[in-house]
């Protein structure tokens, strides 16, 4: 029997609530399928640790994580710690340190969940956004000078490398090729940004030559927001820079009903390091501790994790269970229901056990 070592990092806010839910569903799946077990180690990294020790994770944290097959991550961010400290203290060092350059964000409308778009239901919006996850606008290069003085300056440098752009384009074209519609939209801003973004477009065109069966087009990011809202059926696979995809995928999550259902996978496609799986949402201070966080995004990312580990059947079983529970109307308040996190989780575990 295959055993996978999973590092669970619930971290802050509703992170521990949704990760606990996800682990219960994974446990139900492992018991139901019998073909694999998960050996889960939980880490207490996050903002509380920062307040105690001055660091969100230990100095050798990344080294420790290397021994795992995958990382199951909640959310990081606390009301009394600046967001750039929490993000750069935990999540980004893992993504960048492990070269998880492909951030894969599937979005579709689940049965039983209403999109805010009129007349758009399950099947009308079925996208995968591929976000460049290692460079671009979040390269971390920049600085500030003359702090506090009138002449203070701040720079935030975007980095686009041929290696980085080529590999994300290849990943996106390959993913588009694997989906029935074989359709890719490359998001850009090469009208206003004349260097990095023009190179981005050129490399997209080059890589497209390797995938003659994929139909692709190019959209300026501002126009893309309109197309996502007005004509969701025209889109399938989408590739965008770190910043653009960050924003577009929050919009995608909202159009699919709630941020609480949107998952993401930070993948090292070369499998040199563990990949990391997390809900898109943050620590949601406004609902922390109320027991009403939507666990669906975390279930969905758990399915992405199983698929990455090679347990495709278990991934499908999990998504089938989630779809059944949503269709049955067992929903948290963010998607119009009145169920608690635990009630949704129990229903999903029951559906897993009952599934033939
Ligand atoms: P957020 O995603 O935490 O919350 C935005 C809104 O969506 C809130 O009203 C929240 O209640 C709701 N929401 C989010 N997840 C939900 C769920 N599972 N079920 C039901 N409702 C849900 O974003 P916000 O408020 O901008 O950020 C809060 C903190 O989280 C900040 O410190 C931020 O830096 C951090 N953050 C961390 C992320 C990560 O760890 N990957 C991603 C985004 C934000
Ligand atoms: Mg975001």
Image: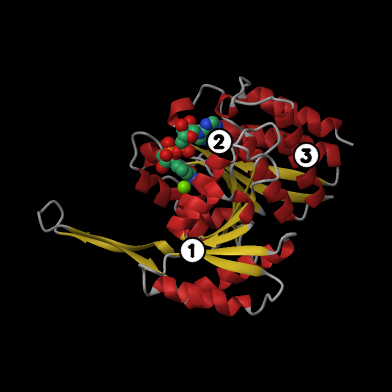
* Mark identifier at residue 312: none
* Proximity of marks 2 and 1: CB atoms separated by less than 8 Å: no
Residue 43 visible in rendering: no
For label 2, the crowd category at 10 Å Cα-Cα, with few meaning under 14, some 14 to 19 and many 20 or more, is some
**In this rendering, position of residue 244 left or right of residue 158:** right
Q: Say which element carries label 3.
A: helix
Q: Where residue 213 appears, x then y in whole percent?
A: 72, 72
> Quick check: 148 above or below 121?
below
Closer-to-camera residue (249/297): 249
Select label 3 or label 2 by which is in front.
Answer: 2
Q: Where residue 193 appears, x then y in whole percent?
A: 36, 69
Q: Which residue is mark 3?
A: 320
Residue 216 position by quadrant? bottom right
What's the distance in space between the residues labelled 3 and 2, CA to CA?
23 Å
Closer-to-camera residue (43/173): 173
Residue 158 position by quadrant? bottom left
**In this rendering, position of residue 141 left or right of residue 262:** left
- Identify the residue at horizontal 48%, vertical 63% (top origin): 134
Of pointers 2 and 1, the one earlier in the residue sequence: 2
What's the distance in space between the residues labelled 2 and 1, CA to CA?
32 Å
What's the distance in space between the residues labelled 1 and 3, CA to CA?
32 Å
Residue that lies at the very extreme toward the top in this rendered image: 338
Q: Which residue is mark 2?
A: 116
Of pointers 1 and 3, the one earlier in the residue sequence: 1
Mark 2 CB near ligand 1 (8 Å cut): no
Q: Say which element carries label 1.
A: loop
Of pointers 3 and 2, the one earlier in the residue sequence: 2
Residue 349 position by quadrant? top right
Q: Where residue 115 appears, x then y in whole percent?
A: 59, 36
Q: Say which element carries label 2.
A: loop
């Amino acid at each position: 029997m295959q055993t996978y070592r999973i590092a669970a990092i619930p971290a802050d806010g509703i992170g521990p609530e949704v990760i606990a839910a996800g682990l219960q569903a994974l446990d139900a799946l492992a018991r139901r399928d019998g073909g694999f077990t998960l050996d889960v180690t939980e880490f207490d990294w996050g903002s509380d640790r920062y307040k105690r020790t001055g660091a969100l994770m230990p100095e050798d944290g990344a080294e420790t994580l290397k021994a795992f097959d995958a990382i199951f991550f909640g959310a990081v961010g606390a009301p009394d710690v600046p967001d750039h400290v929490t993000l750069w203290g935990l999540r980004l060092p893992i993504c960048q340190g492990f070269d998880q350059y492909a951030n894969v964000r599937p979005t579709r409308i689940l049965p039983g969940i209403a999109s805010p778009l009129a007349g758009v239901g399950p099947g009308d919006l079925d996208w995968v956004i591929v976000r460049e996850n290692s460079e671009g606008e979040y390269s971390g290069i920049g600085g500030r000078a003359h702090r506090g003085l009138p002449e203070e300056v701040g720079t935030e440098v975007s980095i686009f490398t041929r290696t980085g752009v080529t590999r994300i384009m290849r990943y996106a074209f390959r993913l588009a090729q694997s989906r029935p519609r074989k359709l890719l939209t490359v998001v850009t801003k090469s009208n206003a940004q004349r260097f990095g973004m023009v190179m981005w477009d050129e490399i997209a065109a080059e890589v497209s030559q390797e995938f003659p069966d994929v139909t692709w087009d190019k959209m300026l990011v501002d126009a893309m927001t309109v197309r996502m809202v007005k004509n969701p059926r025209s889109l399938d696979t989408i590739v965008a820079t770190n910043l653009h995809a960050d924003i577009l995928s929050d919009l995608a999550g909202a159009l699919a009903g709630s941020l609480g259902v949107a998952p993401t996978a930070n993948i090292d496609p070369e499998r040199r390091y563990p990949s990391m799986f997390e809900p898109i949402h943050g620590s949601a201070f406004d609902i922390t501790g109320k027991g009403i966080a939507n666990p669906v995004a975390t279930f969905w990312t758990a399915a992405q994790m199983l698929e990455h580990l090679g347990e495709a059947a278990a991934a499908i079983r999990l998504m089938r269970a989630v779809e059944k529970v949503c269709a049955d109307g067992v929903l948290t308040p963010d998607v119009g229901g009145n169920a608690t996190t635990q009630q949704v989780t129990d229903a999903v575990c029951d559906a897993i056990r009952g599934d033939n």
